[in-house]
Image (tube, rainbow, N blue to C red):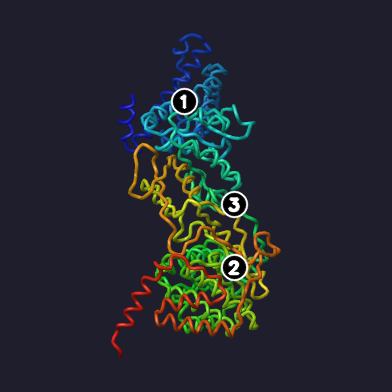
C-alpha cells in the first residue's frame, strides 16, 4: 500500500485534486446509503427512484463546498485538524440540500437520514485523509531521532506539531516541572516529571532534549541546563521570548544551546531617561562602530532616535556591514535618524577633527581599540599608537570642538595590567581624567567591564568550533576565570553610565560572578550530548576515555588568571543597581603630557625597552609577565630601522 501511495504522490496537482474529488463523491454516496441502511434496516429503498435526484443535488453541493472552503488546497501529507472545519461545513450543506430537495420532490426520505449522514461524511472523508497521512509518514518516522520535549504548554505543543512534519525528530514524551501537568496527555504524549528523565533515557534511545519554554527567566533556564547536562544528551532550545515577539524567530526554530544561555543573567530593565539623555535628538559618534561593542552601541543608540549617528570605523567591510544593518533597522522601525558611515582611523587627528566639526558632534562613544592581548604583546608600538595616541587625539579634539559628552569604553584588563593592552587602556583612562580636570564644556567618563559574550576573539566561539571538530578543547589554565556579560546588556549600561557622568567618572559595571573557563568548556561539551576527558597535550588524544578531550595549554602572553574591575576597594553605588563609580588615581595634565611625549618618541624609535620602562613609570600598577616572549614584531622593526641606510 505504501508503494501504491508513493506512486500516487508523483501525480501532478490537477490529477491529485481530481482523484480526491472522485473519492469524496464515492464516500458521500456511501455515507448516504449506510445512513439509509441504518435507518430502514433493509435495501428496499433502492427501488425508490425519487431518492436519487436529491442525493445528486446534495452531493454536488457538498463537493462545491469542499472546494470553496479550501479542502482541496491542502496536501494530504500535511493535513491538520483544521480540515475538519471544511468537511463539517460540507456535511451540513449536504444535509440542508437533501432535506430541501426531498421536500420539493416528495421523495419520501426519512428525516433522520441527513443527520446520520453528517456524522458518516465527517468520519469517512476526514478519517481517510488522516489514515493516508499516517501511512505516508510511516517510512519517515523510522529514520527520525527520538526526543523529549521539555515544556508541555503552548510552545511545547507548537514544537510537537512542527516536528510532526519534519524529518529529524520524533517526540516520544513531554517533561514539565509543573505538577499540575504531570501525568496528563498533551498532543497524544504523556507528560512526565523531570526526575523521570533517566528512566525515559533507558526506555527510548533518546538523541536530544528540546527545551520549549521561551518565557523562562535566565536563572531558571540555567538551572534546567545544569540538571540536564549530566544526561549526555544534546540540548536544543526554542528562541527567546523577545525574538519571538519581535518576529525575528518562531517557536519552531530550534537551535543548539549556546554559552549565552549558560552565562546570561536576568537583565535589569534599563532606565529610559538615562538611555535617551545623551542620545535622543543629538548628533552621536561611535568610534570603532564596526566592532563587537561598537556595533551593538550603534544598534542601541539608533533605537533612541538620534538626530545623526556617525559610525567611525577603519575596517571597510565592518563599516559596510553595520551601515547596511542599521539602515534596514531604521527603515523597519520607522526611525528618521541620519546614519553616516565614515571610514577612518582614530590615529588620524585631522580626519577626526573634520568629522566632529562638520557634523557638530555632541556625544562621542570611543570604542575603537586593539583589544586582543597576545596580538598587542607582539605589536606593542601599533597597540600604543592606536589605544593611547588615538584616544589622546579624539579626546583632545572633542574638548576643543565643544563635544558635550565623551565616553571611553575601557576594560577590566586596565586594572593592575599584566599586558600592554591593559596598560594602554589604563593610560587612555588617565588621558580622559586629565582632560576632565582641565575643565571645559566636555564631560568625560570611562566605563570598565569584562568579557562580552559573542565578541570577536571570544573564547566561546573557539570552544564551539573545537567541539564541532571533535576536539581537543584548549583551555589556558585549570584555574583561570573571567567575568562575562551579554553585548546588549553591556552596551545599554555603557549608554546609561555616560548619562550619569559628572566629569572624570570611572564607572564599573556589575559583571556578576566570575566563571571558571574550564567549567564553561565542560558544560558546553555536555550540552552537545558528549563526554569529556583531560589530556596533557593537543596531540595526546586517547580512545575509550571520552569523546572530547580538554587540554591545558598554559597562559598566553600577558594573560593573568583573575581579572579585576577596581584598583581601589571603595566603589560607590549610583542610581542604577548595576553601575558603580570608583575613585581612581589620576595624573596632572602637564606631567601626563611629558610622559606621553617620551612614550611617543620611544614608539617612533621602536624601542621596546624604553616603552616598557615608561609603562612601569606611569601610575598604572603595570606588572608585566612573559616579558621574554613579548614584542616579536617590535623587535624586528627596531632592527630594520637601525640597519636602514641614512637618507
Q: Is residue 48 left or right of residue 486?
A: left
Residue located beneath label 1 in the image? 127
Which of pointers 2 and 1 lies earlier in the amino acid sequence? 1
The residue depicted at 41 percent of the width and 47 percent of the height is 550
609 over 563 or under it: above or below: below
Residue located beneath label 3 in the image? 265
Binning the other alpha carbons within 10 Å of mark 3 as few (below 14), some (14 to 19) or many (20 upward) gives many
Residue located beneath label 2 in the image? 447
Extreme residue toward the bottom, this view: 647
Q: Say which element carries label 1.
A: helix
**Residue 539, how many percent across, how many down?**
33, 49
**Residue 588, how many percent across, how many down?**
61, 82
Which of pointers 3 and 1 lies earlier in the amino acid sequence? 1
Binning the other alpha carbons within 10 Å of mark 1 as few (below 14), some (14 to 19) or many (20 upward) gives some
- Tell me whether the residue at label 3 lies in contact with that at label 1, contact meaning CB atoms closer than 8 angstroms: no
**Residue 98, how many percent across, how many down?**
52, 24
Give the alpha-carbon distance from disc 2 to disc 3, as whole Å: 20 Å
Amino acid at each position: 500500500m505504501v508503494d501504491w501511495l508513493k506512486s500516487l504522490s508523483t501525480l501532478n496537482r490537477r490529477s491529485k485534486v481530481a482523484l480526491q474529488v472522485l473519492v469524496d463523491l464515492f464516500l458521500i454516496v456511501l455515507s448516504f446509503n449506510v445512513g439509509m441502511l441504518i435507518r430502514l434496516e433493509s435495501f428496499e429503498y433502492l427501488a425508490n427512484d425519487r431518492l436519487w435526484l436529491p442525493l445528486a443535488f446534495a452531493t454536488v453541493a457538498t463537493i462545491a463546498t469542499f472546494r470553496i472552503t479550501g479542502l482541496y488546497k491542502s496536501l494530504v501529507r500535511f493535513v491538520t485538524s483544521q480540515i475538519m472545519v471544511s468537511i463539517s461545513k460540507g456535511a451540513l450543506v449536504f444535509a440542508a440540500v437533501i432535506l430541501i430537495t426531498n421536500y420539493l420532490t416528495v421523495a419520501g426520505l426519512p428525516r433522520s437520514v441527513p443527520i446520520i449522514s453528517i456524522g458518516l461524511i465527517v468520519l469517512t472523508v476526514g478519517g481517510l485523509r488522516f489514515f493516508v497521512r499516517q501511512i505516508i509518514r510511516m517510512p519517515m518516522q523510522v529514520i527520525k531521532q527520538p526526543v523529549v520535549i521539555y515544556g508541555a504548554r503552548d510552545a511545547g505543543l507548537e514544537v510537537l506539531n512542527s516536528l510532526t512534519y519534519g524529518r529529524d525528530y520524533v517526540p516520544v514524551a513531554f517533561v514539565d516541572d509543573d505538577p499540575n501537568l504531570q501525568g496528563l496527555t498533551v498532543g497524544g504524549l504523556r507528560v512526565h516529571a523531570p526526575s523521570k528523565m533517566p528512566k525515559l533515557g533507558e526506555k527510548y534511545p533518546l538523541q536530544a532534549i528540546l527545551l520549549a519554554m521561551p518565557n523562562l527567566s535566565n536563572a531558571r533556564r540555567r538551572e534546567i541546563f545544569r540538571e540536564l547536562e549530566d544526561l549526555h544528551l544534546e540540548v536544543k532550545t526554542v528562541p527567546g521570548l523577545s525574538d519571538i515577539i519581535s518576529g525575528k524567530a518562531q517557536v519552531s526554530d530550534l537551535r543548539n544551546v549556546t554559552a549565552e544561555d549558560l552565562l546570561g543573567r536576568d537583565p535589569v530593565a534599563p532606565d529610559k531617561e538615562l538611555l535617551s539623555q545623551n542620545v535622543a535628538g543629538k548628533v552621536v559618534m561611535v568610534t570603532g562602530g564596526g566592532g563587537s561593542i561598537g556595533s551593538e552601541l550603534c544598534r542601541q543608540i539608533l533605537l533612541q532616535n538620534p538626530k545623526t549617528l556617525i559610525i567611525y570605523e577603519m575596517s571597510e567591510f565592518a563599516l559596510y556591514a553595520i551601515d547596511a544593518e542599521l539602515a534596514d533597522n531604521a527603515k523597519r522601525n520607522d526611525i528618521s535618524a541620519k546614519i553616516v558611515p565614515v571610514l577612518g582611523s582614530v590615529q588620524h587627528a585631522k580626519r577626526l577633527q573634520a568629522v566632529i566639526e562638520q557634523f557638530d558632534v555632541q556625544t562621542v562613544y570611543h570604542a575603537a581599540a586593539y583589544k586582543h592581548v597576545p596580538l598587542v604583546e607582539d605589536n606593542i608600538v601599533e597597540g600604543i599608537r592606536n589605544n593611547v595616541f588615538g584616544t589622546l587625539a579624539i579626546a583632545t579634539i572633542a574638548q576643543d570642538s565643544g563635544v558635550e559628552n565623551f565616553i571611553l569604553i575601557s576594560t577590566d584588563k586596565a586594572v593592575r595590567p599584566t599586558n600592554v593592552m591593559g596598560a594602554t587602556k589604563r593610560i587612555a583612562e588617565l588621558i580622559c581624567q586629565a582632560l576632565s580636570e582641565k575643565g571645559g564644556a566636555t564631560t568625560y567618563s570611562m566605563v570598565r567591564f569584562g568579557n562580552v559574550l559573542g565578541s570577536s576573539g571570544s573564547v566561546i566561539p573557539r570552544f564551539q568550533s573545537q567541539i564541532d571538530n571533535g576536539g581537543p578543547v584548549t583551555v589556558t589554565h585549570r584555574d583561570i576565570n573571567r567575568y562575562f556579560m551579554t553585548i546588549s546588556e553591556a552596551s545599554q549600561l555603557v549608554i546609561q553610565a555616560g548619562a550619569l557622568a559628572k566629569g572624570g567618572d570611572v564607572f564599573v559595571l556589575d559583571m556578576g560572578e566570575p566563571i571558571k573557563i574550564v567549567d564553561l568548556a565542560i558544560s558546553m561539551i555536555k550540552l552537545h550530548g558528549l563526554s569529556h576527558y583531560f589530556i596533557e597535550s593537543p596531540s595526546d588524544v586517547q580512545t575509550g576515555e571520552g569523546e572530547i578531550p580538554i587540554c591545558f595549554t598554559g597562559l598566553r602572553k600577558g594573560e593573568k588568571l583573575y581579572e579585576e574591575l577596581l584598583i581601589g576597594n571603595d566603589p560607590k553605588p549610583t542610581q542604577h543597581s548595576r553601575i558603580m563609580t570608583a575613585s581612581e588615581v589620576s595624573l596632572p595634565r602637564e606631567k601626563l603630557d611629558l610622559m606621553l611625549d617620551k612614550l611617543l618618541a620611544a614608539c617612533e624609535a621602536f624601542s621596546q625597552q624604553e616603552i616598557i620602562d615608561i609603562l612601569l613609570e606611569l601610575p598604572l600598577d603595570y606588572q608585566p609577565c612573559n616579558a621574554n616572549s613579548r614584542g616579536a614584531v617590535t623587535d624586528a622593526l627596531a632592527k630594520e630601522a637601525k640597519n636602514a641606510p641614512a637618507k
